[in-house]
């Protein structure tokens, strides 16, 4: 139990006017503490930032239903739900809303006040707002918005850069994956680079110095990232999800050479020109954007600046292969912020079709772009269909890493030991979605971090051979927890990986493939993929040696028919059941 003992520490019998001013001594009965834990009586939700205030608890309740990918919104204009700051009253056991919405908060030292931020607005609120009673020393009970425009901060860049350098060195010293810094004299290296800080003239110079300092550790994932990654998106043109070429008639317009097909299971992979009611096809010519003709040199890009996610009117002339050839019409489209997802899904679909064609439909194909939520979703987008083929190619080329490699390997290492045989459905393997035949993996120099690890695990567990080139070679991971005073992200390699067959050798070396196949620049220019070709050949050869698992023949099933009984004693051929 937790007991409050009045009086100052060491003076329990104290009396007099100052007796009530001393904080009570708290004595915790440690024995059996874990058995006395009780849950806070609130409904299940996503909670974060739990903190204690006077008489209660506060937390942020995050919106539910968004998922890891955050693509559950109905359209581009929809505003996602925001977090809500809530307070739980320990006496009344009730929950009240303190601020809706809220981005973050901080609690005062005495637990009576909250500083709450909602994007650019900062407010000072009472911690018992909406609670059962006001705090004893109310201090006026005032609540107000803090005018941050009145805050003036003067920064000495040179002094700030020196502090940032020292902070970077300290963070690495305290969080590097092994305390002795893998044999590097970190204090000496820090002292060697510190004089350079006095000579830097810009923030970029400082970042260069920090990169070099981190480089002395010879360890992956030691990053220094400053500024705004990606820059300002407002000056970028919206994208139409198509390949364009010059107008064959010599006009200023642009001919549509190819419209990228949408992938309806991925919301970001929509295709603006193939949307309902648009029907822009290869051969059509784009003439105007919002009534303004295209520049003969720059094409539609300048007219599409800042239009991503908005409705844009295109003037299009139908191509010669259409029934209405030469007809000029206007269509409304919503340009994309990025074509990355659309082009990625198009590439995966193309590779899957190539594998199916070259194998006569016997091989499935799965690409895993990273080992995070996005890659996990991409794996499951087609897992059931592709593992139903006789064999499987698992492509982790370009895998950006993450933390789900164990789950991926667990899926692909399954072996068929039985079948579920429904009457109105196709036979399904037990375990579900287990590969029915050989698995061949593809990896390359851009398979990194958890992409390295998944490749090593595939080899170590005997899931299948690896075709391609040696992987990136960075398996000491990070959590990206710390930023410097100006927002610059600095990372500390904290999580090392060791396998019982290769030891520590993955770091700074990578994982060697079982079958090395290099894709040359000439191959890429010609659209050839020799790694995929070799993987298909190996998988088909292994299929010949080891036929895939097949569902059992129903002709061999047991019979539940009533057995024929012997004749009754004394004559007669009637059957009876005793």
Image: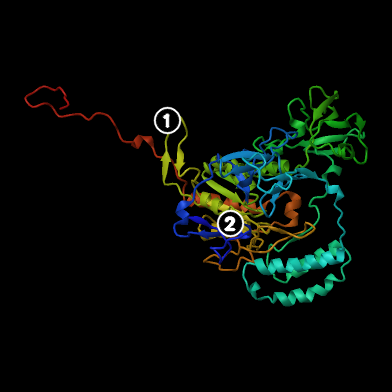
Q: Which residue is mark 2?
A: 454
Q: Which mark is residue 380?
A: none
Identify the image quadrant of the C terminus. Answer: top left
- Please tell me which residue lies in front, 267 or 176: 176
- Please tell me which residue lies in front, 278 or 35: 35
Q: Residues within 10 Å of mark 1 (few under 14, many from 20)?
A: few
Q: Where's residue 296, x and y in %? A: 93, 38
Look at the image and tell me whether residue 508 can be seen.
no
114 in relation to 28, above or below? above
- Closer to the chain start, of discs 2 and 1, is 1
Q: Residues within 10 Å of mark 2 (few under 14, many from 20)?
A: many
Report the mark closest to the observer, 2 or 1. Answer: 2
Q: Where's residue 482, x and y in %? A: 71, 59
Assign a secondary structure to mark 2. Answer: helix
Q: Is residue 555 shown left or right of residue 58?
A: left
Q: Which residue is at the far front?
A: 16
Q: Which residue is mark 1?
A: 423
113 in relation to 159, above or below? above
The quadrant in which residue 163 appears is: bottom right
Assign a secondary structure to mark 1. Answer: loop
- Please tell me which residue lies in front, 284 or 456: 456
Q: Where's residue 157, x and y in %? A: 86, 63
Distance from Cα at disc 2 to Cα at disc 1: 38 Å
Q: Are marks 2 and 1 in contact (CB under 8 Å)?
A: no
Q: Is residue 169 shown left or right of residue 574?
A: right
Residue under the image location 63 percent in, 56 percent down? 443
């Amino acid at each position: 139990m937790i007991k409050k003992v009045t009086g100052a520490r060491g003076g329990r019998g104290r009396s007099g006017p100052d007796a009530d001013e001393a904080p009570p001594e708290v004595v915790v009965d440690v024995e059996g503490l874990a058995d006395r834990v009780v849950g806070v009586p609130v409904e299940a939700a996503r909670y974060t930032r739990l903190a204690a205030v006077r008489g209660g608890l506060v937390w942020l309740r995050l919106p539910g239903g968004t998922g890891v990918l955050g693509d559950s919104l109905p359209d581009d204009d929809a505003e996602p739900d925001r977090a809500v700051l809530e307070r739980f009253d320990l006496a009344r056991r009730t929950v009240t809303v303190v601020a809706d919405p809220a981005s973050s908060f901080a609690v005062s030292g005495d637990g009576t006040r909250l500083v709450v931020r909602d994007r650019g607005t900062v407010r000072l609120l009472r911690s018992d707002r909406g609670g059962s009673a006001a705090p004893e020393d109310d201090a006026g009970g005032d609540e107000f918005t803090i005018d941050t425009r009145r805050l003036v901060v003067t920064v000495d860049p040179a002094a700030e850069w020196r502090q940032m350098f020292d902070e970077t060195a300290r963070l690495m010293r305290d969080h590097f994956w092994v305390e002795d810094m893998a044999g590097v004299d970190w204090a000496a290296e820090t002292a060697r680079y510190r004089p350079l800080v006095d000579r830097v003239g810009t923030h970029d110079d400082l970042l260069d110095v920090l990169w070099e300092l981190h480089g002395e550790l010879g360890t992956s994932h030691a990053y220094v990232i400053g500024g705004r990654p990606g820059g300002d998106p407002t000056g970028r043109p919206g994208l139409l999800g198509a390949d364009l070429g010059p107008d064959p008639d010599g006009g200023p317009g642009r001919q549509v050479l190819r419209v990228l097909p949408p992938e309806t299971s991925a919301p970001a992979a929509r295709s603006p020109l193939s949307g309902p009611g648009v029907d822009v096809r290869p051969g059509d010519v784009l003439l105007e954007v919002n009534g303004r003709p295209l520049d003969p040199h720059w094409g539609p890009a300048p007219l599409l600046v800042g239009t991503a996610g908005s409705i844009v009117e295109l003037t299009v002339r139908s191509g010669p292969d259409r029934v209405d050839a030469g007809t000029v019409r206007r269509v409304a489209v919503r340009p994309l912020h990025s074509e990355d997802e659309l082009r990625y899904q198009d590439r995966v679909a193309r590779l899957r079709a190539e594998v199916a064609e070259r194998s006569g439909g016997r091989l499935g194909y799965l690409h895993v772009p990273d080992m995070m939520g996005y890659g996990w979703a991409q794996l499951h987008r087609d897992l059931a269909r592709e593992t139903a083929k006789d064999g499987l190619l698992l492509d982790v080329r370009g895998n950006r890493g993450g933390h789900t490699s164990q789950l991926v390997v667990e899926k692909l290492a399954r072996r068929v030991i039985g079948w579920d045989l429904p009457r109105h459905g196709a036979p399904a393997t037990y375990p579900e979605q287990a590969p029915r035949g050989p698995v061949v993996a593809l990896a390359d120099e851009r398979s990194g971090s958890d992409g390295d690890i998944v490749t090593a695990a595939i080899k170590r567990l005997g899931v299948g051979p690896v075709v391609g080139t040696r992987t990136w070679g960075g398996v000491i991971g990070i959590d990206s927890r710390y930023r410097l005073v100006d927002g610059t992200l600095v990372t500390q390699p904290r999580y090392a990986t060791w396998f019982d067959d290769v030891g520590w050798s993955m770091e700074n070396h990578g994982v060697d493939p079982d079958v090395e196949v290099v894709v040359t620049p000439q191959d890429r220019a010609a659209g050839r993929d020799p790694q995929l070709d070799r993987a298909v050949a190996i998988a088909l050869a292994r299929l010949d040696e080891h036929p895939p698992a097949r569902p059992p023949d129903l002709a061999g099933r047991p019979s539940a028919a009533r057995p024929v009984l012997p004749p009754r004693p004394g004559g007669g051929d009637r059957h009876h059941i005793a």
